[in-house]
Amino acid sequence: MAGRRVLVFPSSAELGPVLAQLVTSRAGKAIGSHGRFTLGLSGGSLVSMLSKELLALSELDCSKWLVGFCDERLVSFDDPESTYGLYKSQLFSKINIPESGILTIDCSLPVNECAEDYTRKLKEVFPDDDFPVFDLLLLGMGPDGHTCSLFPDHPLLEETKKIVAPISDSPKPPPQRVTMTFPVVNSARCVAFISTGGSKAPVLKEVLEDGEASPFPAARVVPTKGELFWLVDEPAAASLTIQVERLGSGAKL
Ligand SMILES: O=C1O[C@H](COP(=O)(O)O)[C@@H](O)[C@H](O)[C@H]1O
């Protein structure tokens, strides 16, 4: 697929520093061109890897960052399933991001209202865009091929109008969530998937090698104008037969 880069690292130990470098390089570029860096975060295994790698940098200035969530679980912030709660304890409390730079859901609302409220928050900070254009979205992919909270065979895969959608029947617990839709994901300037571990190998092969014929949600991530990276480790890449780039921890993106 034109423009897509599939980057394979020996292990997540080599992948992690390159993820941090990608974030800081796109942050520098965004702040230089429009004065702020808009970053969309996913949950799951990304939380601890990203937190660890960003905190390992000798200099990290997040004062001009605006962080949103690609999806969020509708649970209270002190629940161990809360993506915001995990980032708060592992990352946000340790960096200089202003509170106004973190767009959280209102977890006291019912799921439909929560999605509407998060849509309103995103529209406020992206007043000029029909669909918010994030500088960088960091995505994960489950072993079932889901990304954000967009699950295989779910009607939300066909959503074309909403910015944020509610889901109350997520096959992966917790069942109630809100998620960015594909039009938002595919409007980003840069999208990077981070996928590690052998449990991802079979689905990764189908997503990357079957192209648009693939039924998996992650295969529908094709930014219209932006960059697309897949950062994967050897165990996740074990079944791939396409051409990939093999990199080490010093790679610059
Ligand atoms: O439930 C979720 O799962 C995906 C994938 O997580 P991973 O642990 O397999 O990397 C994640 O990207 C998403 O944000 C989360 O809500």
Image: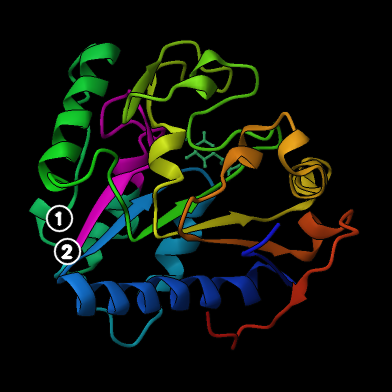
Residue 68 within the segment the image draws in magenta? yes
Residue designated by label 2: 97
Residue at the spot x=59%, y=85% of the render? 251
Label 2 crowd (10 A; few <14 / some 14-19 / many >=20): some
Against 17, residue 41 (above or below) is above
Against 94, residue 175 (above or below) is above
**Could you say where residue 231 lies in the image, as x and y percent from the top left?**
63, 64
Residue designated by label 1: 101
**Residue type marked 2:** Ile
Q: How many numbered marks are there? A: 2
Q: Nearer the viewer, residue 44 or 238?
A: 238
Kindly check if marks 2 and 1 are in contact, taking CB atoms under 8 A apart as contact: yes
**Could you say where residue 156 lies in the image, as x and y percent from the top left?**
49, 19
Residue 160 within the segment the image draws in magenta? no
Q: Which mark is residue 7?
A: none
For the residues labelled 2 and 1, the Cα–Cα distance comes to 6 Å
Q: Taking the image as drawn, is residue 61 in sight?
A: no
Which quadrant of the rendered structure holds the N terminus?
bottom right
